[in-house]
Amino acid sequence: MDADLINGLYIVAFVLFIVGLRLLRGPRTALRGNQVAAVGMAIAVVATLLQDGVGDFGLIALGLAIGTAVGIPSARAVKMTAMPQMVALFNGVGGGAVALIAYAEFREAGGDLPLEELIPILFAAVIGAISFWGSNVAFLKLQELTKARPKIPPILNAGLLAIAVGLSAGIASGAEAEWVFLGVLVAASLLGVLAVFPIGGADMPVVISTLNAFTGLSAAAAGLALDNIALIVAGMLVGASGSILTKQMADAMNRSIGNVFFGGFGAGGTALASGPGEGDEDRTVRSTSAADVAIQLSYAERVVIVPGYGMAVAQAQRTVADLASELERRGIDVTYAIHPVAGRMPGHMNVLLAEADVPYDRLKEMDEANGEFGRTDVSLVIGANDVTNPAARTVTDSPIYGMPILDVDKSSSVVVLKRSMSSGFAGIDNPLFYAENTSLLFGDAKASVGDVLAEVHSL
């Protein structure tokens, strides 16, 4: 096939990738952005298949059929609450595919590859294996199939990384044995597992973003080895955007990326988050009713809604949006305070609220929202536990110490919607629940918000 035609198709695909990525910046254009990028990927696949010597078309067709049969029904059937798990799982599949491609290329060549191909293949194998196994552990934790959070010494992770790099250097220096390459994959795989297992739930969005960037970088490296421009460009776009997002989210949590990835945050303790000088005898909560909450909201001037994973689990976003619309109709200023790591994946709350047609300008990022809590009459916290926990400011042995939080406790009144007094995903108690200006409305978030809305209508 004519090389100019193939390169022309690749250029069209790259342009569509970039346009699609740009459209993902806002909820109103995100769907179109996905569609544009998907068209670009389809063009890139066709261009690759048009190249001479591409391989066994029957096997390729079988792979496409299996992937389509698994992917489309899974994506259509998944609930929004399970979307983070699916993102982690699909991301891991990408990293695993890259690692397998790297191994297959090395084995087919008998290890006899020029250095400019060998180094990208080794990089793709290491990063792809880390991404695959790390993403699978993230899936298990998000699906709550495991709650294990062992304390893994950072020196162990550093040692595994050194082994993977050392074996890779040996291969690059002339060791052609297949078992050495398998050793690289095993060391990288163990690193992926052990690096993610200690991670607490509060920083899981950062982990997912990091692993997503890893998958992109490994794909780009595989593209260099295979001389496939589509893999290079697509991989670098994913790797660069994922790296930027990871850095922004880590900064929002006051953590270094290395600290997050090597298990420094979220590992270990589940100490109660009581403040200095607070005894257990003072730790009482004030339960409230839907009628009382409706009165507070109806006579407020400023209301801030703080959504969290509890809202996602209850699928309460549309009911919340209806309540906000009713309050706004009565002249009350209603905004939403969004923490960067609320939920289980980057942008989780933004996606849910966009699904409920909440105007995007009503969503306030943490820095902007925190400046408003001091003059807020009522903060309505819906299933957001860890990101509103004042222990992050004062309790030095807390797993979330130092993480910037939403300062809802500075509001005149705080209403927290919870199913029970169980801790959040980080596994620690929240002193906000025992504050004098806090009351708790127990029950399913969707049902509770619906009850409050009914009471508001009756006033």
Image (spheres, rainbow, N blue to C red):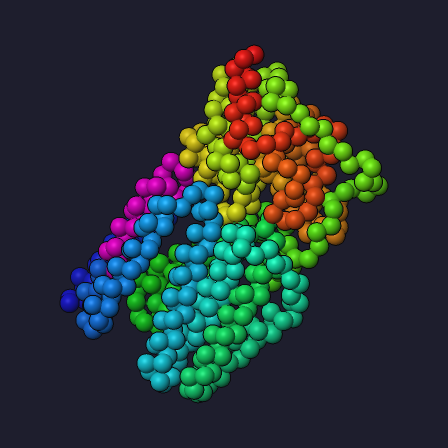
Q: Is residue 76 left or right of residue 57?
A: right
Quarter residue 382 falls in: top right
Q: Quadrant of residue 381?
A: top right
Please tell me which residue is depicted at 65% across the width and 71% down the height of the picture: 155
Return the residue nearer the eye: 194 or 109.
194
Residue at left 54%, top 41%?
A: 309
Residue that lies at the very extreme toward the left in this rendered image: 1
Q: Which residues are magenta?
A: 22-45
Query: Percent from the top left, x then y, of residue 400?
Result: 67, 49
Was residue 43 drawn as part of the magenta stretch in this picture?
A: yes
Q: Nearer the viewer, residue 403 or 138?
A: 138
Q: Left or right: where does residue 386 sit relative to residue 233? A: right
Number of dots carrying numbers:
0
Q: Is residue 120 visible?
A: no
Query: Which residue is more in the foreground, 147 or 240?
Result: 147
Residue 264 in percent (x, y) is at 65, 59
Residue drawn at x 32%, y 50% as measured from the top left: 72
- Is residue 89 shown above or below 56? above
Is 176 placed left or right of 297 in the picture? left
The prevailing secondary structure element of the residues shown in magenta is helix
Question: The C terminus lies in which quarter of the figure?
Answer: top right
Residue 354 location, x and y as percent?
Answer: 43, 35
- Residue 30: image location, x then y, percent: 37, 41
Residue drawn at (31%, 70%), measured in percent from left and top?
A: 227
Q: In what quadrant of the picture does the N terminus appear?
A: bottom left
Eyeballing the image, is 426 above or below 167?
above
**Which residue appears farthest toward the top when viewing the image?**
459
- Based on the displayed image, in which of its 4 quarters is residue 64 positioned? bottom left
